[in-house]
Amino acid sequence: MIFEGQDLVRLPRHALKAVRRNMQMVFQDPFTSLDPRWPVSRIVEEPLIAYAAGSRKERRDRVASLLDLVGLDPARYGGRHPHELSGGQSQRVAVARALALEPKLIICDEPVSSLDVLVQAQVLNLFERLRSELGLSYLFIAHDLALVKQVSDRVAVMYLGKLCEVGPVREIYRQPMHPYTLALLASIPDPDPAHKRRDTATVISGELPSPLDPPSGCRFRTRCPRAQERCAAEAPELRADGDGHLVACHFPLAGAWQPTTADAAQEAAGS
Ligand code: SF4
């Protein structure tokens, strides 16, 4: 794991603590990621205390400005406990806590999957606003492909713990090269029932193998419609194929994808 040129796995403990303040995390479940015994102000102040950042008064002022930043009135919400908050409010508190130390990177692990759709949109808008206001980078982990497309500049597709494909979001969605990525994209429902995709080799069958005992060679080979002998014998390396697009496949796809009607409309609109 390399962060700003430093190998995090090899860093000594004290150096790792110094680097950690630049990387914060927003977890999937806002209810279980907040300490139920603490009021909101204490939860948001915790990283500042852990890093002895500022005097008590400065920390309190910072907590108030952080709550303000995420759209929560400090006077109204600072004294509340997590059980007195809605899902969206809890996730805003988690975001405020993640921002407390002014990190450069925030790892968001399915941060909106447990929220209802309306609250999802509010929290995503908050992420977007903070990204442009504070110059943040997000590592956004999600299963919802429409969401991934909306929030990402660059996408990495994983199967059984291995990267299959990495590239700019437009490249991945317009021209996927790995059969698994293609199958994922093909599983997005198309709102137009009359629209038929040219490619029929997008459906994958079978069960997900155990990550503890993955298949030999390519991990996707037991479900891949393009698998050949070589796929069982040799694990494909992630290779660059121009324009920062990388794929780990012995027989990558080329030109097999026809976007959905909604995708095509978006492309035509230049979005
Ligand atoms: S390496 Fe073989 S099995 Fe793996 S994705 Fe490519 S074609 Fe399919």
Image: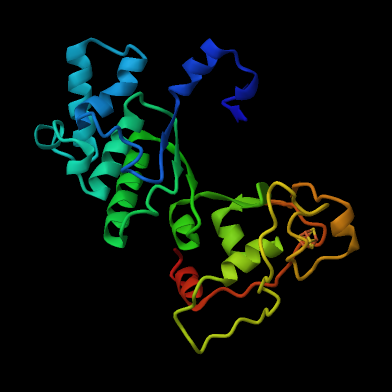
Image check: 178 left or right of 186? right
Check the picture and name the quadrant holding the C terminus.
bottom left
* Vertical placement of residue 255 versus 194, above or below: above
213 to 221, vertically: above or below: above
On the question of residue 244 being in view, the answer is no
Viewer-closest of 243 and 5: 5
Total marks drawn?
0
Task: Tell me where residue 216 appears, x and y as whole percent.
Answer: 82, 52
Q: Residue at x 73, y 66 (%)?
A: 223
> At which x and y percent is residue 206?
69, 69
**In which quadrant will I find the N terminus?**
top right
- Give the vertical position of 143 relative to 207 (above or below): above
Q: Is residue 222 visible?
A: yes
Comparing 136 with 145, the one in front is: 145
Residue farthest along the left direction in this orientation: 75
Quadrant of res 79: top left
* Ligand 1 position by quadrant: bottom right
In this rendered view, identify the residue nearer to me: 170 or 93: 93
Location of residue 22 in the rendering, given as x and y in whole percent from the top left corner: 45, 25
Q: How is the image coloured?
A: rainbow
Q: Position of residue 111 (x, y in %)?
A: 39, 47
Residue 32 versus residue 269 in the image, above or below: above
Residue that sits furthest to the bottom in the current view: 194
Residue visible at 47% across and 15% down in the picture: 18
Q: Tell me if 8 is positioned left or right of 212 in this view.
A: left
Residue at the image position 19 percent from the left and 30 percent from the top: 39
